[in-house]
Image (spheres, helix red, strand yellow):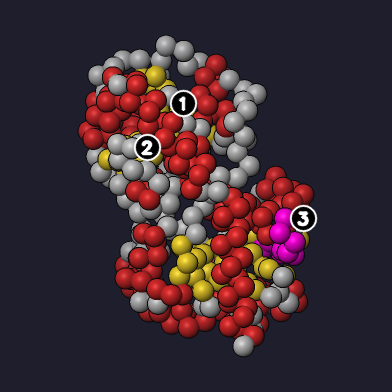
Amino acid sequence: MHIVELIGKSEGGMKRHYKALINGLIESGHEVAALCNFREPDIKELVQIGAAVYHVDISLDPPTAIIPSIIYLYRLIKRLDPDIVHLHGFKAGVLGRIAARLAGRPVVYTVHNFVLDNKKGVSRFLIRPLEKVMKAGTNAYIAVSKALRDSMIDDFSIESEKISVIYNCIWDVSRDAFLDARKKHNVGQDEVLLGTVARLIPSKGIDILINALPLIRQENVRLMIVGTGPDEGRLREITNALGLSGRVIFTGQVSSMNEYYKAFDIFILPSLSEGMGISVLEAMYFGLPVIATKTGGIPELVRHGSNGLLIKPGDSEGAAKAIEYLIKNPDKALELGRQAELDAVKDFTYDVMIKKTLEVFDKVLVKYKA
């Protein structure tokens, strides 16, 4: 099978999913063309995996860029002549479906996030009819959580039989650590290190977590924020305004996540909206006690009181109480972490993700050729 995998600018979980999927498709004997706008290290990684990489800079802004982007994609898809075109994310989903339909190729669209979240005004008004029109040219959908599947059904009237739920997986995550992240960032062994891993955008709710820190009565607690993004400047301002610059560590972009997961005592993701939460899954894999918000696909990973704790989105006081509970009850924290690791290893495997994705592709091709 010859597969085109198209994605726009992306960081975090979506990019990791994209690379894992391409690796699995190639390992399964398929030919993959990766159409993306990644940085050079990521492109080199895709080439080493065995993908043919094409630089594609898709844009919906300004509107005048839409037509040239569609024409470029159409010509490229026509030239590559794939068996199937697989799209990731909203921008790729819009432009890629139009281009693939013009090129006469079947389309699978993977939904990673809630399409209407953070959309306001005219754009929110236009998305509903646009998505309802485009569903006719979408052969199948993949949602990375049941919550996302349900939102596509409720918001855009997508037929349930056209949507498959395929969870993200653990891939290329080593438990080995060659760097002592605590030592690098001057965190004492007697200090409790809270950790979060996220792209720094408003929907991740990192400001809620920073505001929770002064509410924690234990004084030896520090917070490490791993990741970068457009919200970093605002988050630093909040940190400084609260007098927390000595207790909050911004690591920026890191090359190897495992050293940081191994450094954390407690992992917390305070998202206001989350399609699935791959950093939650990775933290579970490392056996960390996890605190996460009850939103989107997160409750499909974290079962409150069994393999982690769930809190309300936007609740700094609730976050502080959950952190204090785990600090005061280390045996319970250890129990939650152990169960989280067992669940991550058992239920969210790389092989299952690849197998189920190929099953979707095969069904689409059978119907397309019929």
Q: Quadrant of the C terminus?
A: bottom right
Mark 1 residue element: loop
Residue 204, position in %: x, y? 39, 45
Q: Is residue 213 above or below residue 106?
A: above
Q: Which residue is mark 2?
A: 307
Q: Earlier in the sequence, mark 3 or mark 1?
A: 3
Q: Which residues are magenta?
A: 27-35
Give the image quarter of residue 180. top right
Q: Which residue is mark 3?
A: 50
Q: Quadrant of the N terminus?
A: bottom right
Mark 3 residue element: loop
Q: Amino acid at mark 2?
A: Asn
Residue 158, position in %: x, y? 40, 76
The reply to whether residue 247 is visible in this rendering is no
Q: Is residue 324 left or right of residue 193?
A: left
Residue 288, position in %: x, y? 44, 30
Q: Which residue is mark 1?
A: 264
Q: Earlier in the sequence, mark 3 or mark 2?
A: 3
Q: Nearer the viewer, residue 46 or 240?
A: 46
Give the image quarter of residue 159. bottom left
Q: What is the spatial separation of the Cα atoms under label 3 and label 1, in whole angstroms?
A: 34 Å
- Can you tell which mark lies on residue 166? none
The reply to whether residue 312 is visible in this rendering is yes
Q: Earlier in the sequence, mark 2 or mark 1?
A: 1
Residue 227, position in %: x, y? 51, 38
